[in-house]
Image (cartoon, rainbow, N blue to C red):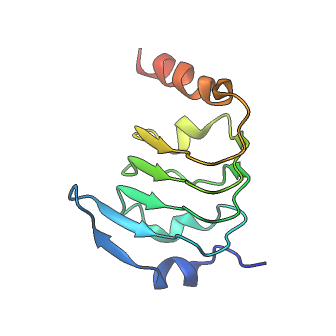
Amino acid sequence: MPRLTVEVITESEQYVNAVKDRELNLRAKKIPAIENLGATLDQFDTIDFSDNDICRLDGFPLLKRLKTLILNNNRICRFAEDLNLSLPNLDTIILTNNTMQELVCIEFMIFNDRNTNE
């Protein structure tokens, strides 16, 4: 099974997207888990993980710049409870066509974010 290695990250397409954000394209690489994102050196506003095999949204280092995660067409059903600590400026998560049963699984992120900003 393919892994998200430093080589995959550095060899993936990187560009300025339509809203002028720096984006890393990790689409359709059959990635099963998020790992090694420290290799991005926190240079991206958006990371596109669409069309992979990710089940759990965790494994992020501290990425202060990241604002948007695109996660369409994965198998995400669980979230790390400290995701808001690793991604403090995340404001958009696109989760179309995943295996979540209820949105309550991301409620803690909203609640925790409110508590850390008070």
Residue 53 % position (x, y): 70, 63
Residue sitting at the far front:
97
Total marks shown come to: 0
Residue 6 % position (x, y): 57, 78
Name the foreground residue: 38 vs 95: 95
Name the foreground residue: 30 vs 10: 30
Position of residue 45 relative to residue 99, above or below, is: below
Residue sitting at the far right:
1
Residue 19 % position (x, y): 22, 55
Q: Which residue is drawn at 62% across and 48% down?
A: 97
Left/right of residue 83 with respect to residue 10 in the rendered view: right
Residue 27 % position (x, y): 53, 70
Q: Quadrant of the C terminus?
A: top left
Q: Which residue is drawn at 55% across and 54% down?
A: 72
Q: Quadrant of the N terminus?
A: bottom right
Left/right of residue 29 with respect to residue 92 in the rendered view: right
Q: Residue at x 67, y 73 (%)?
A: 30
Q: Is residue 109 visible?
A: yes
Name the foreground residue: 10 vs 27: 27
Q: Is residue 63 visible?
A: no
Position of residue 101 relative to residue 27, above or below, is: above
Q: Quadrant of residue 5?
A: bottom right
Position of residue 113 relative to residue 101, above or below, is: above
Q: In which quarter of the image is residue 35?
A: bottom right
